[in-house]
């Protein structure tokens, strides 16, 4: 399915709908992981912002390009919290060049945490063996303000 958005606000609204669907089910045996793939400026971080807001996270979110990962505790009144999720982990793999860098941030532990929702920007830069079975969302910058989001 492809959706075109014409503003950051529309991209955040699409993300909010996806977030609400993601928390319909209770946590499984591992984290709920979504890989975000697309060029610079294609809407990945904007999507994460809308996703997080829908989960009740009020903090301003920026891409963790230099720290690689940020963890946000879900508020107790969040629909995701009520389903059993406890945190949103935002990963930006843009600067990940070696598997050792993923070990430093305990990436694999987060992937195994059934109470975590993990959003990975630049998921295509992480070796496929680490992300088997991960749902991916592709972002494309079409025109000046038009983004194409493919699920």
Image (tube, grey):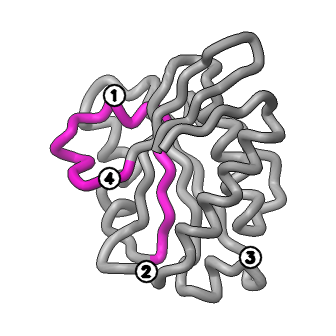
Q: Quadrant of residue 149?
A: top right
Q: Which mark is residue 75?
A: 3
Per the image, the residue denoted by label 2 is 27
How many C-alpha atoms fall within 10 Å of the one at disc 2: few (<14), some, or many (≥20)?
many
Residue at image position (45%, 32%) is 37
Q: Quadrant of residue 72?
A: bottom right
Q: CA distance from mark 1 to mark 4?
A: 14 Å
How many C-alpha atoms fall within 10 Å of the one at disc 4: few (<14), some, or many (≥20)?
some
Q: Pointer 1 and pointer 2: residues touching (CB < 8 Å)?
A: no
Choose mark 1 or mark 4, whichever is in front.
4
The x, y position of residue 4, in whole percent, is 65, 32
Q: Helix, strand, or loop for circle 4? A: loop
Q: Mark 1 or mark 4, which has the lower sequence index? A: 1
Residue 69 versus residue 71 in the image, above or below: above
Residue at image position (47%, 84%) is 26
The x, y position of residue 16, in whole percent, is 70, 57
How many C-alpha atoms fall within 10 Å of the one at disc 1: few (<14), some, or many (≥20)?
some
Q: Pointer 3 and pointer 4: residues touching (CB < 8 Å)?
A: no
From which residue to which does the magenta span run?
115-135
Q: CA distance from mark 4 to mark 2?
A: 15 Å
Q: CA distance from mark 3 to mark 1?
A: 31 Å
Q: Mark 3 or mark 2, which has the lower sequence index? A: 2
Per the image, the residue denoted by label 1 is 125
Q: Mark 1 or mark 2, which has the lower sequence index? A: 2
Does 134 appear in magenta?
Answer: yes
Per the image, the residue denoted by label 4 is 134
Residue 95 versus residue 116 in the image, above or below: above
Choose mark 3 or mark 2, whichever is in front.
2
Q: Mark 3 or mark 1, which has the lower sequence index? A: 3
* Left/right of residue 133 with respect to residue 71 in the rendered view: left
């Amino acid at each position: 399915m492809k959706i075109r958005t014409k503003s950051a606000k529309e991209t955040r609204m699409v993300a909010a709908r996806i977030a609400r669907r993601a928390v319909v089910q209770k946590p499984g045996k591992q984290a709920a992981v979504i890989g975000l793939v697309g060029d610079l400026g294609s809407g990945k971080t904007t999507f994460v912002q809308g996703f997080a807001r829908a989960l009740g996270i009020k903090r301003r979110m920026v891409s963790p390009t230099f720290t690689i990962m940020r963890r946000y505790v879900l508020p107790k009144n969040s629909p995701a919290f009520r389903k059993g999720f406890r945190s949103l982990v935002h990963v930006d793999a843009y600067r990940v060049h070696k598997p050792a860098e993923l070990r430093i941030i305990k990436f694999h532990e987060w992937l195994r945490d059934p109470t975590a929702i993990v959003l990975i920007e630049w998921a295509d830069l992480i070796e496929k063996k680490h992300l088997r079975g991960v749902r991916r969302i592709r972002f494309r910058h079409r025109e000046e303000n038009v983004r194409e989001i493919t699920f």
